Amino acid sequence: MVKSALGIIFPNAYDELVPELTSERLMASIPFASRYRMIDFVLSSMVNSGIDNISILARQNYHSLMDHLGSGREWDLTRKNGGLTVWPPFAEKTMNVYKGRIEALAHIIGFLSSQKEKYVIISDTNIAASFDFKKFIQAHIDAEADVTVAYTREPLPQSAINAKLMNKGMYYTYDIEDGRVQKLYINPQTPGVQNFGMNIYCIEREFLIRMVKDAYMQGAVYFERDVLAKSLDQIRVIGYEYDGYYGRISDMKSYFDENMRLLEDENLDELFKNGTIYTKLRDDNPTRYIGDARVSNIMAADGCVIEGEVENCVLFRGVKVGKGAVVKNCVLMQDTVIEEGANIEYIITDKSARITSGKEVKGTDTFPVFVAKHQVV
């Protein structure tokens, strides 16, 4: 029986990698896979693993997240004890806009000290995966670890290497021997397959409290750079390889690619194989195909109305494709309207965008064109 754990989610991490999508929202709120938001995957994975005390430490642009999460009812997190707690900046006198995990966790030390769970799971929201946290916690216990870090085996994406955020420590790789992390590399540019950190951690709650208090008193800001990297000789940090399906968002191109990968049935099945992914409900009619509508290899959420031709596309709720319109290789977010006779290819539209009648808008597979929220083309 896996011991009890509480979850802590950082929804703003990596906002800067997709500025087009995070000007009015945070990474956690980015729509993904036709009807979900990025936070739905880690939040649902925690709930499916029996974690029902979850805190979200928001930094900015969190209004869309609050609207999406509500009281947490869809995730069965409306509870008297535990449940879902969102900590916005300035929620208490001591809280402000944090820079790194240590600052953020230091602001909720009182809360952490009052909880009863033995372990803490920490995660960001830039990875869509159906993660089994029961196995993760059990691996932590079996290894008698102080900290367990999740990682994948993959080459570093070029988008991460090219990111103009090198001073922040945006991504990490690990040198692992016999399961133990020997070195932590910050923003490396090493070629070939690496042990690429997922920014998912398991730590005993009391140990985390001591670690954060000591680090904060010494002026530490970032958990990985200022604490883990400097403590590998003193504490036992164990690596946990995640070998399941996942989608990692590191720029607009990866966002497009990860959505399009889900048009392959085997990828879709793998993403959802470890339990239900919950999300905010929206009461809509089933998607309707009218008249001469033709579709091929699409993922369409409820509420769509299709009268034209749609091929190799991910359509979110309420998308409308007019008569005679041709839509290929596109990701169209909620309530996008493609008017009659429009011809678009390799396009990402944000919510409520509109492509007007007869327009032709085309990107390429290496550079999809982005149409902003409420924009009319």
Image (cartoon, grey):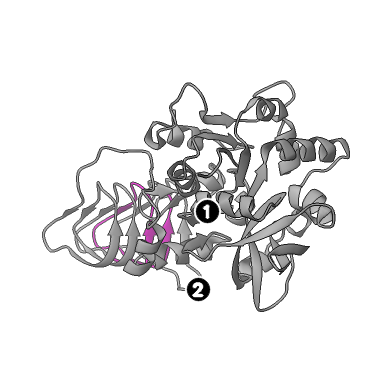
Q: Mark 1 sits on what residue?
A: 135
**Which percent across, then down, holds residue 243?**
52, 66
Residue 210 figure quarter = top right
Q: Nearer the viewer, residue 337 or 70?
A: 70
Distance Cα–Cα, label 2 vs label 1? 37 Å
Q: Is residue 164 left or right of residue 82?
A: right
**Which residue is found at the position 44% from the left and 45% from the top?**
44
Amino acid on which disc 1 is placed:
Lys
Count residues near mark 1 (Cα–Cα under 10 Å), then give few for <14, some for 14-19, many for 20+. Answer: few
Q: Mark 2 sits on what residue?
A: 366
Amino acid on which disc 2 is placed:
Thr
**Which percent across, then down, holds residue 63?**
52, 33
Q: Nearer the viewer, residue 343 or 63?
A: 63
Residue 358 figure quarter = bottom left
Mark 2, mark 1: which one is toward the viewer?
1
**Which percent across, then down, holds residue 52?**
49, 35
Q: Is residue 54 visible?
A: yes
Q: Nearer the viewer, residue 341 or 175?
A: 175
**Which percent across, then down, holds residue 248?**
54, 61
Taking the view exactly as shown, the residue that stands out farthest to the bottom is 192
Quarter of the picture holding the C terminus: bottom left
Q: Is residue 296 left or right of residue 2?
A: left
**Which residue is found at the position 73% from the left and 72% from the top?**
189
Numbered-mark total: 2
Does 300 appear in magenta? no
Q: Label 1, secondary structure: give it.
A: helix
Does 334 appear in magenta? yes
Q: Label 2, secondary structure: give it.
A: loop
- For the magenta stretch, what is the residue range? 327-350
